[in-house]
Structure formats: structure tokens, C-alpha cells
Image: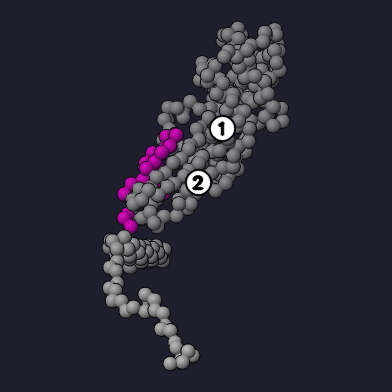
Amino acid sequence: MSKDSFAPPTSRTWRDIPQEVRPRAMSREGRRRVAMGAWKAAAGVAAVAGVAWGVWMVAAVVQGNPAALPASGKPAPIRATQLSTDGVLDQAWLARTLALPKGATLMGLDLERLRGRLLVDGQVRSAELDKKFPDVLAVRISERSPVARLMAQFGNDQPRAFLVSRDGVSFAGSGFDPAMVATLPWIDGVRPVRRGDGLEPIAGMEGVSDLLATAKLEAGHLYRTWRKVSLGRLASDGELEVWTRDGLKVVFGASEDYVRQLARLDIVLESAGADPVRPLREVNLALGSQVPVSFGAAPMGAAGEPAAPAAAPAFTLPAFPDFHSHP
């Protein structure tokens, strides 16, 4: 054999050796991962189906066809209305004002529209409504309190009595104690302007409210005799005129301290108001410590109010010391 014809055997590796290997079974952790993936996929499909079902129910209600809903998906009728207020209005007033139809559901309510119904009544300062599913409507309101009364007449209508709050809003008034209402003085010297079923707010009622509240707190025995308060000279002269039940007219300065003026009035009435022959007819407290007064039995006017005592004598009482409100 020649040298050139010799060929060494080809080297072989372990890969060239046939092997019979069985595939390894899936581990426990692998099986758990596969099961979790399948569960998540099923949950996702169920969630999408639930959302689609809810959208279908809402669409059926909005389109006015709740009968198309399955029995288990129909909204329940409103079972109760819950009223929360800082005043005197009650459930009966709420039911009359909301006027919910029989069988109404929370899904079918327009809360903004119902809120507008509540605010039509001037006694309601603010209102909030909430749906408490499945069947309760919650209503929270804040009320105005009356400080005086006003009689108004429009055209040939019968005169109507209104209650007036501090911010000048007039309203019919519901739920107030009639005995308390009877103690409120009447407002005069204004021209009521109609707005819908009510009146335009009355300007200047903040000052009237301050006077009445101060008199009620500091001089209740005087306040109980007051019959009406006139705003006729408030804008022009800055004065409020009070008429008592026995015909005395008292002029207050709207920019002066009411406690001080009430103290001066008390002194005047105590010192000069006990003469039955010459009864006091007018006391002017708007000029500071000098308090002009008028005496005389004035004839009664056509409206039942004492006429101005033009011929009655008048004098000025001595200056009064300054009076300060106590803390």
C-alpha cells in the first residue's frame, strides 16, 4: 500500500451516537401557570360580557323602554326620600314640591330638574340631591329665615302676605309657627316687583334685619310693640321709620349704632312718654345725641295710621350720654 492511499478514520462525537430520550413531563409550576392564564382569559371575557349587559340595560332605560329589560335587571321604584334641612320644611312639603310620578326610579330622575323645582320656593336657599341606590333619594336643603312680612297685590288679584328674609327674598312660608309669624313687623315704603310667582328681592333688608335683630335681643319690650318698618327714606336720607302699635313713629339712622339709639329711645319713652294728655307721636333718633320729639293726639288717617302731627308742639330733649353695647 502506498503512502498516499492511507486515509485515517473520521473522528466521531457523542452527537453521532443515536439516543432514545423520552420528553420530560411538564412540571407542577408550569401546569399552574397554564391554569392561571386560562382563568384570567375567562375572567376577561366575563367582564366584557357584564359591561355589555350593563350598557344594554342603561340604554333600555334611557330610550324609555324599561320593559325590554329582564326582570332581574329592572330598577326598583323609589322607596323613600330622605330630607335633611336646617329649617322647618318637612317631608310633606318635599313630596308636594318634587311631585315624583308613581313608580319613579332613581335611574329615570333628572336631579338638576328636581333641584330647580325646590329652588322655585324662595324659602329654599340651596339644595342638593343624591341617588342612593337602589331606591332612596336623599335631599339636603338650607332654608331662609323670615325677619319681616310684606303685603303685595298685583292687578286685580287678592293681596298676598309674604315673608321676607335678611337678603330681601320674599316667600310664602311653610312650616313656621303662626304665633312667631304674627310677631314679625310689616315692611312698608317699597314697591314690590313681581317675578314669576314671587317678588324681586327687596333692597336694604340687611339694615332692617340688623335693626330688628338688635331690638329683639337688646330691647325686647320695645320690639314687641313694633308694627311696621318703612324703607321709604332709606335710600334718600339713610333713615328707617318704625311705627309702633299705639301710633308712635320712631326714626332710626341706618348708619348709627342701633344699641345706642335703642337706649336713647328707652330713656325718652320713660321720661316723656307717660303723659296721657300729650302722648308722644314721633321720636327722631337719627340726629345723634340730640333727640327731637313731637307730642299731640294726631288724627287717624284713612289707612288707620296716625297722620303727621304738624300742629303738635315739639322740643329737643337734652343731650344724652353715649351708650355702648355690652359684650
Which secondary structure lies at badge 2?
helix
Q: Position of residue 91 (x, y in %)?
A: 37, 41
**20 vs 269: above or below:** below
- From mark 2 to mark 1, how far is it between C-alphas? 18 Å
Task: Between residue 136 and residue 114, name the one nearer to us.
Answer: 136
Quadrant hosting residue 105: bottom left
Q: Position of residue 300 (x, y in %)?
A: 59, 24
In the rendered image, is residue 277 in sight?
A: no
Queried whether the magenta region covers residue 96, the answer comes back as: yes
Q: Position of residue 165 (x, y in %)?
A: 54, 34
In the rendered image, is residue 201 in sight?
A: yes
| Side of 224 relative to 267 (left or right) | left
| Side of 11 relative to 202 (left or right) | left
Task: Between residue 257 and residue 239, name the one nearer to us.
Answer: 257
**125 vs 31: above or below:** above
| Side of 92 relative to 217 (left or right) | left
Query: Which residue is label 2 attached to?
Result: 120
| Side of 253 relative to 98 (left or right) | right
Q: Position of residue 168 (x, y in %)?
A: 58, 36
Query: Which residue is label 1 attached to?
Result: 166
The amino acid type, in three-letter code, at marker 2 is Val
Q: Which image quadrant: the N terminus?
A: bottom left
Q: Residue at x 69, y 27 (%)?
A: 238
Q: Residue at x 62, y 12 (%)?
A: 324
Question: Which residues fall within the magenta stretch?
Answer: 73-98
Task: Between residue 223 and residue 47, name the one nearer to us.
Answer: 47
Task: Between residue 294 and residue 105, name the one nearer to us.
Answer: 105
Which secondary structure lies at badge 1?
loop
The amino acid type, in three-letter code, at marker 1 is Arg
Q: Earlier in the sequence, mark 2 or mark 1?
A: 2
Label for residue 127? none
